[in-house]
Amino acid sequence: MQRLLLLCLLAAPPTSTAVLGQDLNQTIDVRKLAAAVQSPGFQSRVVGGEVTTNARLGGYLIALRYEEAFICGGSLLHELIVLTAAHCFLGRVKISSWLAVGSASKLNDRGIQREVKEVIKSAQFREDDMNMDVAILLLKKPMRHRTLGKLVLCKKHLVPGTELRVSGWGLTNPNEFGPQKLLRTVTVPIVDKKICRASYLPTVQLTDSMFCAGVLGKKDACTFDSGGPLVYKNQVCGIVSFGIGCASKRYYGVYTDIMYVKPFIEQSIKVLLAKR
Ligand code: ARG
C-alpha cells in the first residue's frame, strides 16, 4: 500500500533526488504530496508538547542524518548501537551517507557525531503496511560522553492508559515543511489495541508488531519524529512509526511494539557487536 508510505512522506524521499527539509525548492513538492494524502481536517493539529533538551530527557535521543539532512530520530541502546525505524532507510541505501548525532538539542547542534558501519532492518519489514518497522545501527566508533544516556528495552507489556514520553524534532504543525529546530516532547497514553485497530479500518490493517498511543485531536508524534523512542521509566517501549495526519481526531499515532520485536533487536545487537 503506497499510501502508508505517503503517511510518512517527509521521512521518505518523494523522489530519488530529494534532500529533505533544508532545501526550499523541495517544499512545494512536499506540500503537494501532503495535500494528496491528508485531508485538511487531518492537518489542523499540532503535537501538543513542549520544548525540552536532550540532557533533560536523559541524553538518549539520537538525530539521524542522511547526506546532511535530518531524517529520523533514534535511541542509544549501547555506545555502539542505535535503535530506529526501518522505514527511515527507504530510498536511502548508502550507509556511508548516514550520520548519528548524539547530545543535540537544537537540530543544528553539532553534538557528538558518529558514522554508521552497518544497518540491520527486520527481514519482515514491509513498506506497504509498515509491519516490523524496526532497524538497528552499528556505529563505527563508540558514542561516549557524560551528556549521553542509554535506554534499556521495554521490560513488560504496558496496559492502556499508561503514559509514555515521545520526543523529537518532528512537526508541531503540519503546515510546516521541515523539522523543528528545537527538540520537543509530549506524554501520550497507550491506547487499547482493539480500539486502535478498529479506528484504522478499513484504511490500514494494523499488524501484531504495532500498538497505538496518543490523545485524539491533542497529543501525538508527527512527521520527522519517526524512529524516535516512546519511553517508559528509561525503557524504550515503542518506536515512532506512522499515523494518518498528526493528532488527528480519528487516528492515533502508531508505534512499533518493542515487546514484540525484542527477539529481533537482541539478535541483531548480538550479530553486530560480534563484528566490531
Ligand atoms: N512516518 C512519520 C515519519 O517518518 C512518523 C509519523 C508519526 N505520525 C503520527 N501521527 N504519530 O516521521
Image: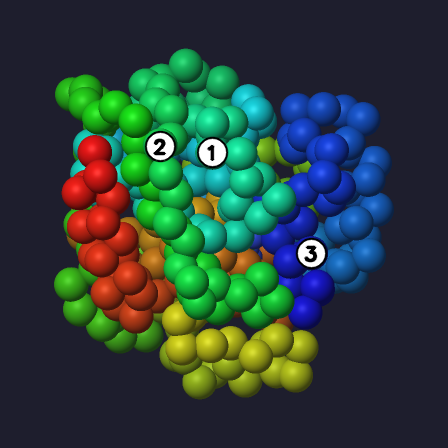
Local SS, label 1:
helix
Quarter where residue 69 is shown? top right
Q: Nearer the viewer, residue 270 or 62?
A: 270
Q: Residue at x 66, y 32 (%)?
A: 20
Q: What amino acid is found at the position of numbered circle 3 in the picture?
A: Leu
Q: Amino acid at mark 1?
A: Ile
- Looking at the picture, tell me which residue is in the foreground, 54 or 76: 76
Of the image marks 1 and 2, the number of the one nearer the N terminus: 1
Q: Earlier in the sequence, mark 3 or mark 2?
A: 3
Query: Depth check: 19 or 170 in front?
Result: 19
Question: In front: 40, or 202?
Answer: 202
State yes or no: discs 1 and 2 in contact (Cβ < 8 Å): yes
Residues packed near mark 1 inside 10 Å, few (<14), some (14 to 19) or many (20 plus)? some
Which quadrant: the C terminus?
A: top left
- Residue 185 appears at what percent x and percent y? 40, 42
Please name the residue shown 66% across and 24% down the image: 22
Mark 3 → mark 2, Cα distance in angstroms: 28 Å
Amino acid identity at mark 2: Lys
Looking at the image, residue 245 lies above or below residue 194:
above
Which residue appears at 30% of the width and 70% of the height? Answer: 260
* Labelled disc at residue 32: none
For disc 3, the marked residue is 6
Circle 2 residue: 117
Task: Say if residue 26 shows up in the picture.
Answer: yes
